[in-house]
Structures are given as C-alpha cells and as structure tokens.
C-alpha cells in the first residue's frame, strides 16, 4: 500500500511513497515496484535529500520509478539519469507537478 495516489486527466495513476529518515527506505523502494507492477503508471519515492543521496541509483533508472529528495530548506530535488536536478521550493514543486491532475488521494498522517 502506498501513501498517496495522484490521478491525471487521462487516467494516469502515480503512486506516492513517503519515507522519513527513520523509516525503512528499502521497503519503500519495494512498495514503489509493487505499485508499478499493480498497474500504476509511475511511482515516486519521496524522502530527505540526505537519505536519497546515499541510495544506489540503479533502481531509479528503471522505467516508472522516480526518486525525490527534500532538503532542510524545503527545496525539492529529483534524481534523473543525468544526476540530481533542483525543482524548486516544495510548495512550487507540488503545485507544478500536480497541475492537470483531477484528484489527489492519500492516507492521513
């Protein structure tokens, strides 16, 4: 089970898995793969930038899995095949990434 789901206007479903530094990040990667296998278009693992930088990136170079790191200043970084890319501040990045999505569902914290 993932923490949240974003649904696009064309029915695209993106699974969102959020892990804190104290959570089992490897389990989160497994949940992302499970979501893609269960029919989600993509899966995103969101964690702190410090934790994200320590992970081996081969798992995130596979199709459909993305890695997002958030630093202490609330800036959002995404890992691509070319390396880390700053997306901007967390509020801007969330609003921009969810534009066009009809609904956002998630478990309460």
Image: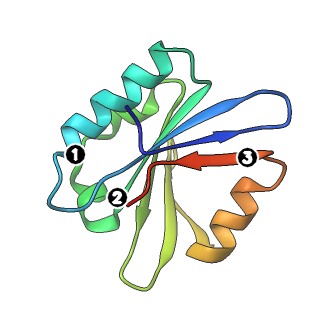
> Residue 46, how many percent across, how many down?
41, 54
* Number of numbered discs visible in the structure rendering: 3
Quadrant of the frame with the C terminus? bottom left
Quadrant of the frame with the N terminus? top left
Q: CA distance from mark 3 to mark 2?
A: 22 Å
Q: CA distance from mark 3 to mark 1?
A: 26 Å
Q: How is the image coloured?
A: rainbow
Position of residue 37 relative to residue 57, above or below, is above
Residue 89 visible within the image = no
**Which residue matches tag 2?**
47
Q: Secondary structure at mark 1?
A: helix
Residue 9 - label: none
Q: Do tag 2 and tag 1 residues touch (Cβ < 8 Å)? A: yes
The numbered mark, 3 or 1, whose residue comes first in the sequence reads: 1
**Which residue matches tag 1?**
25
> Which dot, 3 or 2, sits closer to the camera?
3
> Which dot, 3 or 1, sits closer to the camera?
3
> Residue 84, how many percent across, how many down?
47, 58
Crowdedness near tag 3: few (<14), some (14–19) or many (≥20) residues, C-alpha within 10 Å: few
Q: CA distance from mark 2 to mark 1?
A: 8 Å
Residue 93 placement: quadrant: bottom right
> Residue 52, how many percent across, how many down?
30, 56
Position of residue 23 relative to residue 88, above or below, is above
| Residue at the (48%, 14%) spot, across then down | 38
Position of residue 53 relative to residue 74, above or below, is above
**Which residue matches tag 3?**
103
Left or right of residue 2, residue 27 in this image: left
Crowdedness near tag 1: few (<14), some (14–19) or many (≥20) residues, C-alpha within 10 Å: many
- Most foreground residue, 19 or 85: 19
């Amino acid at each position: 089970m993932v923490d949240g789901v974003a649904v696009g206007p064309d029915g695209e479903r993106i699974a969102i898995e959020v892990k804190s530094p104290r959570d089992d990040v490897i389990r989160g990667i497994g949940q992302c793969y499970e979501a893609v296998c269960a029919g989600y278009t993509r899966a995103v693992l969101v964690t702190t930038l410090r934790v994200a930088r320590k992970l081996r990136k081969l798992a995130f170079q596979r199709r459909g899995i993305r890695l997002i790191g958030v630093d202490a200043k609330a800036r959002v970084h995404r890992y691509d095949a070319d390396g880390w890319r700053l997306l901007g501040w967390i509020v801007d990045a969330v609003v921009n990434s969810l534009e066009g999505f009809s609904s956002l569902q998630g478990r309460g914290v």
